[in-house]
Image (cartoon, helix red, strand yellow):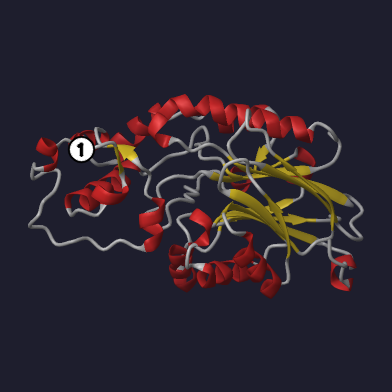
């Protein structure tokens, strides 16, 4: 751990924490990722989908962060960037509990009477969208492991934040717009290479509804190409039959599992975005066509009592254009007032 600067030791009256999934290791998008991180200027950032820590370390150094890297058992590691003094950290890995990892980091808040220390626990829960509801027990098991780690010091205020790959109770979605975009990409040949699991039968592939060879090729960004969920090819005929609109979105949303996020609320954690914006859509993913909220900041009640705001950052204006080039996730930022 590097030396602590005088600015880190000065009394603090605010705290900004963020979570950001940088998508598949960052690719060639580091300039855009750095611009987003600089703009949100959080004190602590939980970063998901790190593959090579070297470019992230370079960005961290340029922006004045200490980087704490946690290697996952299989792939898609996590990191924490901090401008606060990090007192201790542990990288939790358990192949039986998850394919990834969770970083537990304890921070000092210099001069803060109410919260001289706090902790974060990062998560990047199982995605496996092709398994639909069968992946939700995996996510529940992963969250049980994280909450059990937090129970080792139950009186210390803490946050659980990251990419939950799961919906919250009551949240809406924009499923049909997103599925319609997948259909367009498939018909123009883009999705044929990046989105279908399993071999498409030749008879199906020859049908015009599967691939319209007279259609103009669709443009697709690197971010969209890297982030498109890989679905069984049998899903695509169903997409063609689904009518678009709010009613279909509500029906599809009602069928999606929400137990993982509900378990956090049942355990007493506060969904920071919902606390400050009860009715906002809060869509965090994908940046090229926002459709769902799967990135969260959860706080213990003591920290939540000091919550000032929580929002999905970098969604609009010039910074929004940068964010859409940087990743398929928008960052989520939470602000807390200290000593108040």
Query: Could you say where residue 133 lies in the image, as x and y percent from the top left?
Result: 44, 26
**Residue in the image at 76% along x and 50% along y:** 306
Decide which of 38, 64 is in the foreground and name it: 64
Query: Could you say where residue 127 lies in the image, as x and y percent from the top left?
Result: 48, 38
Q: What element carries label 1?
A: loop
Decide which of 254, 247 is in the foreground and name it: 254
Residue 216 lies, with reference to residue 241, above or below; the image says: below
Left or right of 296 in this view: 62:
right
Total tally of numbered discs in the picture: 1
Q: Can residue 8 be seen in this view?
A: yes
Q: Is residue 288 visible?
A: no
Quadrant position of residue 304? top right
Decide which of 214, 276 is in the foreground and name it: 214
Q: Name the residue under label 1.
A: 200
Query: Could you say where residue 70 lies in the image, as x and y percent from the top left?
Result: 69, 49
Left or right of 30 in this view: 210:
left
**Residue in the image at 63% along x and 32% along y:** 95
What is the quadrant of the N terminus in the image?
A: bottom right
**Residue in the image at 45% along x and 56% along y:** 328
Residue 66 lies, with reference to residue 107, above or below; the image says: below
Query: Could you say where residue 126 lies in the image, as x and y percent from the top left?
Result: 53, 36
**Residue in the image at 46% along x and 73% along y:** 318
Mark 1 Cα-neighbour bin, 10 Å: few <14, some 14–19, many ≥20: some
């Amino acid at each position: 751990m590097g030396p602590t600067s005088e600015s880190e030791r000065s009394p603090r009256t605010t705290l900004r924490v963020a979570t950001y999934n940088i998508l598949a290791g960052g690719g060639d998008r580091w300039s855009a990722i750095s611009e987003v991180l600089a703009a949100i200027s959080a004190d602590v950032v939980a970063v998901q989908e790190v593959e090579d820590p070297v470019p992230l370390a370079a960005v961290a150094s340029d922006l004045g962060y200490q980087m704490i890297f946690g290697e996952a058992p299989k792939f898609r590691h996590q990191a924490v960037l901090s401008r606060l003094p990090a007192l201790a950290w542990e990288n939790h890995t358990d192949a039986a509990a998850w394919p990834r990892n969770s970083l537990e980091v304890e921070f000092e808040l210099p001069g803060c009477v109410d919260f001289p220390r706090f902790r974060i626990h990062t998560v990047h829960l199982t995605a496996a969208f092709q398994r639909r509801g069968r992946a939700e027990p995996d996510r529940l098991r992963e969250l049980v492991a994280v909450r059990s780690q937090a129970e080792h010091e139950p009186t210390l205020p803490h946050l659980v934040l990251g990419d939950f790959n799961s919906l919250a109770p009551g949240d809406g979605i924009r499923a049909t717009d997103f599925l319609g975009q997948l259909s367009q990409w498939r018909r123009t040949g883009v999705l044929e290479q990046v989105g279908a699991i399993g071999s498409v039968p030749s008879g199906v592939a020859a049908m015009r509804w599967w691939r319209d060879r007279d259609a103009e090729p669709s443009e697709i960004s690197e971010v969209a190409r890297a982030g498109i969920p890989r679905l069984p090819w049998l899903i695509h005929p169903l997409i063609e039959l689904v009518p678009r609109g709010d009613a279909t979105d509500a029906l599809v949303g009602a069928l999606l599992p929400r137990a993982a996020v509900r378990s956090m609320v049942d355990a007493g954690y506060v969904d920071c975005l919902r606390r400050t914006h009860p009715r906002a859509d809060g869509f965090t993913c994908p940046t090229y066509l926002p459709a769902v909220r799967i990135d969260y900041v959860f706080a213990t009640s003591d920290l939540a009592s000091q919550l000032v705001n929580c929002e999905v950052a970098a969604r609009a204006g010039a910074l929004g254009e940068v964010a859409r080039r940087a990743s398929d996730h928008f960052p989520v930022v939470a602000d807390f007032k200290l000593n108040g």
